[in-house]
Image (cartoon, rainbow, N blue to C red):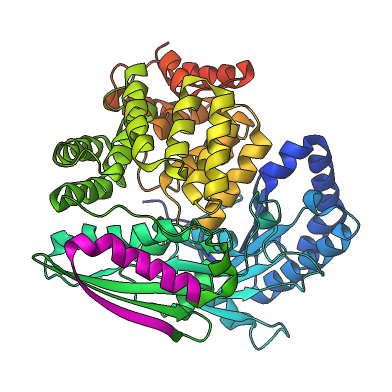
Amino acid sequence: MQRENRRLAAIVAADIAGYSLLIGRDEEGTLRALRAHRQELIDRLIEEHGGRIANTAGDSLLLEFPSAVDAVRCAVAVQAGMAARNRDIESDRQIQFRVGIHVGDVVVEGGDLLGDGVNVAARLEALADPGGMILSDDAHRQVRDRLDLEWQDEGERELKNIVRPVRVWRWRAEQPAGSTARGDAAAAPVARNSLSIAVLAFKNLSGDPEQSYFADAIAEDITTELSRFQDLFVISRESAFSYRDQAKTAKAIAAELGIDYLLEGSVQRAGERLRVNVQLIEAKSERHLWSERYDRVLTDLFAVQDEIVNAVVSTVGETVWRSAAAELKRKPIENFAAYDYELRARELLHRFDKQSNQEARALLIKAIGLDPNLVDSHITLAWTYVLDYLNQWEATGPEALDHAFAETEKAAALEGDTYRVHRLYGRIASARGEDDKARAHIERALELNPNDGDLIATYGGMMCALGRLADARTWADDAIRRNPHYPGWYATLSARIHYLEGADDQAVAVLNRLDRLTIVDHALLAASYAQLAQTEVARRHVAEVLAINPNFTISSHIAAASYRRAVDRGRIAEGLRKAGLPE
């Protein structure tokens, strides 16, 4: 067996923050500036510090150094040099690098570096601030007593597809006055507020693991209610719930999410009785600001949720409390069995696969049969039809959108002018090609709730369909900022934008980070690999597409994606055709 060429190295992964947005604003100017930065500063510093460029890909660099000290010295010099070069450039046109550094074992193949050490460095880079740097603990041990730099210990982090947690250390360059810590956020459509919170998954103390969906639903509903307050930045469900089984302190979780407060709790359900314990924690000091226990009957659940939301917004600050112009209005539970079916269906919907979608729909139809006035059931049922249409699972034609619209109409009659209703109307209108109507509904939804990550990503998807790729990237980046552990469809949107911009390699890189791929992901990977002339890999994804939907056609796929520009439809069709999918 051939022996791998291995060695220990300091690996540096760097990429440009907000690169797609920069390219969208001024492609030629950005590429020209990047070439100048490389020729006049970066390449020279790499050589001076004994490093070499192992790989480049558009906005990213992979570097190898013989020592961590040399790697960090080079990174600091590059960041200082870039700060000086950016000084007289408008903030929305500045090129800023994120840097991740790890010391580990690598495999050398040709001139390229492969292996787990490279993957760790790449994951660390994604955590860094623009103009800043993240070190693994292995790298930090090599430099802590040799370089006069200040490092912030951020504790152990779970890195995607890395088996063991990695302790990380952050270095930030001194920020110019008026700048933000994260460059991408400066371009975000909704400003980051000073008060921020995450609602962690509530613990299920009912003694029955099958009751976990109930505890999740309570925490999710509280998240939804809190996100309506414009002066409160609320982390999305997926990111907050990702800490469910992790033994991390409030301070560590808050540092990872960049938030001020945590809400945690537990739920115990026994027969018709309900006990909810909840506490609000100030993250920095880990001080418990408020706690309460609610012992109620199940039909009082909505009242308990409203009491918790009121207590939270009044405790975290007067600014948030004043923004609550209207009282919370929740309908009482008239038929708890119907509500229980809806909660189970909602948990299934979060799995985003065909079978779960079908099971969710069956439960929702039961729920509506028991209580036609339960608005959440109509909202969730409408989404099952939208997901069917977008993913080509079951009801794939216009009739799926008709069913979704009918359920949205019922929800609107029950709930009125809410962001949930407008988001659905907007998504359906966009799929139907009714662009003015879609935009009006989504923008109204954003007025009613500017904090919801899914809603922000939905707007980004609409911008993508319209061919406004720079705007789409801005909204997609903001959704990810609010939901760092985002669901897979955010990545699908991001990859689609890359593909339409002609960045096939970046589309592939984004989708290959996902644990599960949908039919849309497989189709996009097939097209991307075909454009990269990687025919065998493209064909593997074609097989996956046809296994999920044997009736897949290029024309139906493009229709479902609602691309408005001929150039975008043409590029999608070209890639799918090269991959070998049927017309």
Q: Quadrant of the C terminus?
A: top left
> Is 123 left or right of 538, judged from the image as shown?
right
What residue appears at the point 79 percent right and 56 percent down from the top-left corner? 43
Residue 54 in the figure: left or right of residue 301:
right
**Closer to us: 45 or 25:** 25
User: Outermost residue toward the top?
Assistant: 583
Percent x, y of residue 138? 53, 76
Residue range highlighted in magenta: 289-314
Image vertical order of residue 208 relative to residue 191, above or below = below
Task: Indicate whether 214 appears above or below 264.
Answer: above
Quarter assignment of residue 186: bottom right
- Location of residue 133 (image quadrant): bottom right
The residue nearer to you, when weighing 122 against 53, is 122
**Location of residue 94 in the rendering, given as x and y in whole percent from the top left corner:** 80, 53
Residue 313 sits inside the magenta stretch: yes
Give the main secondary structure, helix, strand or loop, of the magenta stretch.
helix
Q: Residue at x 82, y 61 (%)?
A: 82
Can residue 56 be spotted in the picture?
yes
The answer to whether residue 507 of the structure is visible from this angle is: no
**Can you name the residue that lies furthest to the left here?**
271
Q: Is residue 101 magenta?
A: no
Question: Residue at point 30% right, 45% down?
Answer: 376
From this viewpoint, which residue is outermost toward the right? 88
Residue 312: x %, y % from top left? 44, 72
- Tell whether 105 sits left or right of 216: right
Q: Is residue 467 above or below residue 242?
A: above
Residue 372 position within the rendered picture, expressed as x and y whole percent measured from the top left: 21, 38
Figure label count:
0
Nearer-the-camera pick, 404 or 326: 326
- Of residue 89 and residue 346, the one placed in the foreground of this image is 346
